[in-house]
Amino acid sequence: MGSFLEEITLENLIDRADADRGYIKDTEVRTLKVQAMPDTGAWTLIINEEIREKLGLDIKTEVNSTLADGTAAKYPLTEPVSIQWKNRITMHQAVVVAGAKRVLLGALPLEGMDLIVDPVNQTLAGAHGDEAVYGIY
């Protein structure tokens, strides 16, 4: 199975809340379209420092993580960010890996948007068809 990229839109949720409350204009909400590699081996969204800065995401804590190459370290964890793929949306924190060359769309955001990786067609697909099914717990 090869890797592939999908375009996703990332949005600063604090900015969005401020715009919804009329504190800032919609045009001031920091949003970024990026190419992301779906990666079920990653647990959440992985971004680099440049993307974190462009979105203005604050660091909330650090987490112990191990990269695919076996590097284990503490990495910054941001406040939640909105992640959109086509008509699906979810919110998750992002792990910041300073030198990351690719944005990784991990298992939790994929699950949050009710998506699966289709390895044959190298694309994302709805786990339950074209319409997302969201579980209520």
Image (cartoon, rainbow, N blue to C red):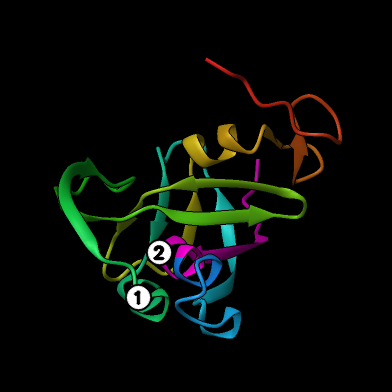
Query: Is residue 124 found left or right of 83 in the rendered image?
Result: right
**x then y, percent, for residue 87:** 77, 51
> Hey, what amino acid is under mark 1?
Gly
In front here: 65 or 115?
Answer: 115
Q: Is residue 1 visible?
A: yes
Marks 1/2 in contact by CB < 8 Å: the verdict is: yes
* Residue at point 65%, 40% (across, down): 1
Q: Residue furthest right?
A: 130
Q: Which mark is residue 56?
A: 1
The quadrant in which residue 76 appears is: bottom left
The quadrant in which residue 35 appears is: bottom right
Query: Is residue 97 found left or right of 63 in the rendered image?
Result: right
* Residue at point 64%, 48% (across, down): 89
**x then y, percent, for residue 135:** 62, 20
Above or below, 79 relative to 127: below
Query: Is residue 35 found left or right of 85 in the rendered image?
Result: left
Number of residue marks: 2
**x then y, percent, for residue 97:** 28, 62
Q: Residues within 10 Å of mark 2 (few under 14, many from 20)?
A: some
Element marked by disc 1: loop
Q: Which residues are magenta?
A: 1-17
Q: Which mark is residue 14?
A: 2
* Residue at point 57%, 32% (across, down): 111
Above or below, 32 relative to 12: below
In front here: 135 or 3?
Answer: 135
Above or below, 20 relative to 120: below
Q: Residues within 10 Å of mark 1 (few under 14, many from 20)?
A: some
Element marked by disc 2: helix
